[in-house]
Image: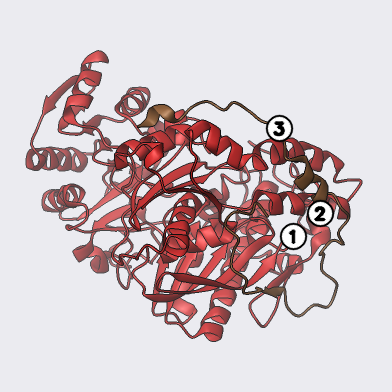
Amino acid sequence: MNVLGISYNYHDAAACIVSDGVVVAAAEEERFSRDKHDSRFPAQAIGYCLRAAGLGTRALDAVAFYEKPARKLERVLQIGKAYAPRSAENVAAQFPSLITDGMNVETTIRDRLDFQGPVYFSEHHLSHAASAFYVSPFEESAIMTVDGVGEWATCMQFSGSGTHIVPRREIRYPHSLGLLYSTLTAFLGFCVNDDEYKVMGLASYGTPRFRAELDQLIALHEDGSFTLALPYFAYMYDRETMFSPEMERLLGPPRRKGESITERHSDIASSLQALTEDVMVGLATALRREQGSRNLCLAGGVAYNCVANSKIVARAGFEKVFIQPAAGDDGAAMGAALWASHTLLNQPRRIGQHNTLLGPEFSAAEIEPRLVAFGLKFEGLDDEALCRRVASLINDGFVIGWFQGRMEFGPRALGGRSILANPCLPDMKDILNARVKFREEFRPFAPAVTEEAAADYFELDGISPFMLMTPRVRPERAAEIPSVTHADGTARVQTVSRLHQPLFYRLIECFGEASGTPVVINTSFNIRGEPVVCAPDDAIKCFMGTDIDFLAIGPFLVSKV
Amino acid sequence: MVENVTESTGSSAPTEAVAALLEPVPPQLPVAGETTQWTECSGEAVDPLSLY
């Protein structure tokens, strides 16, 4: 049984193929179109998934869409009516897309895929829940999804057992933790639905001295739910501004885009982060109390908040937590396909460790002609020689583009499309931010560490293969890896296993042999504002356009001199 | 294989479904003094063929 899952029409369009209950391919459309957060019909991602699975569309048993377009339209119309007339412009802006794209999803799918089989519609948060639970290592689990908004729900709690997911309760729009975070992201002069992680990074530089003010934005209830103080918010009727003049009276003037970041901005970010952590821990604690499961699955955009995730792990009472690494709407394409496969088509689950390396890969025969076409100087090496050479170069302070195997599904680069550097050099963070990534100086870099060495360097209980946890760097190790130790002493760590990523593991091991430190800086292979590279040409262009010193692409090591 | 991933031909909106949604419905906005925002789920299975 082959099911194609699709998400599009809002942001981060994606496709995924599930065959006989197993995810075999998934990718975001932006990686092919090179348009970041591309929301259009994911034709190229679908094409890739079909190729990877060896299928034509006539071999598909079903196509599953990630949400209910009519219910979303209902929400926009009802909220628009409730806030009329000031909502008129907002409704008018959304209406054409909701009608022509949203209500015609089935027609579009049938036309563009020439598909005559069943087209199924999941629900937005159910897709998130399915994306986490069905690929988790748990036979049964509590499930929590938190994001901006789906159809009506902004947060849901489910119980999962075997192939069944049962929705239990939900918090509905306009009460949304994700939109609260996005509203303050806009207030701090960053882009909504894009820069929330920057606010999380900025938070570490501040103190939560605005917490009392932010507590006025939200009432936390004993059962873990919350009610927003809506007069401070404008997103119900004004998606451009997100916040009302009341917010400015509460917090002072907002930061304009491009304006320098002050201590006050860091302190607001810190206060927001602390509030978010408390809400997330409250929700999870109530869920633990309500359902009694020892396991928790998390998804939805707020699950990208790795600092809050770590607080949930530490405080909410669950023994094991699994977070879907593609927690946003891209991952919902996977969730829709899994939901249809297991729930509607009765395919069995295969419980094991989830792998995010689900995107395209390129052979040496495909890569070499591109290097020649770009006139690059390169040499071919076997795996062991490549790892030793790259480790030596990293140890000497060079910055490496690392393009190996399949591309990651989800926003984190995990050793497939990564930029690697030496975390022991104190100025490496500034070098990468200024000369390679062209991004804000306050942004931290993440470490990748061998699983065996993780506990020596980080206060981490277990593994963190998807960079969704931020343990403290052990104080005695912080001076050894200054470029990955954030201002608050934590690091968004990736643990790398020999079994699942043998080449990347061997590289880190070789770096450990060369430097004494089995940890490398691992940041996504892209520059600010662009999607992570997908194909060899993308990688070569990024390599040529930045101060990346060497490119390790397939078996080839490329230098600029 | 992938050659049948084609460009959209476009189509008209399903006007009946839209018209039904335009019927006035009381907005589900909160009132002051609430002690929970949870809405219990109905337990009904998702209709996989419905857009609503």
* Residue beneath the point at 17% across and 39% down: A390
In the image, A48 versus A58, the foreground residue is A58
In the image, A550 versus B38, the foreground residue is B38
Residue that carries the numbered disc 3 in the rendered image: B12
Residue that carries the numbered disc 2 in the rendered image: A79
The lab-note entry on whether marks 3 and 1 share a chain reads no
Q: Amino acid at mark 1?
A: Pro
Q: Is residue A344 above or below residue A114?
A: below
- Residue A85 location in percent, x, y? 92, 46
Question: Which chain is tinted brown?
Answer: B
In screen coordinates, is A68 left or right of A383?
right
Q: Amino acid at mark 2?
A: Ile
In screen coordinates, is A153 left or right of A497?
right
In screen coordinates, is A36 left or right of A503?
right
Q: Is residue A391 above or below residue A509?
A: above
The lab-note entry on whether marks 3 and 2 share a chain reads no
In front of the other: label 3 or label 1? 3
Residue that carries the numbered disc 1 in the rendered image: A174
Label 1 sits on a secondary structure element that is: loop
Label 3 sits on a secondary structure element that is: loop
Residue sticking out furthest to the front: A116
* Residue beneath the point at 81% across and 54% down: A79
Give me the C-alpha separation between circle 3 and circle 2.
25 Å
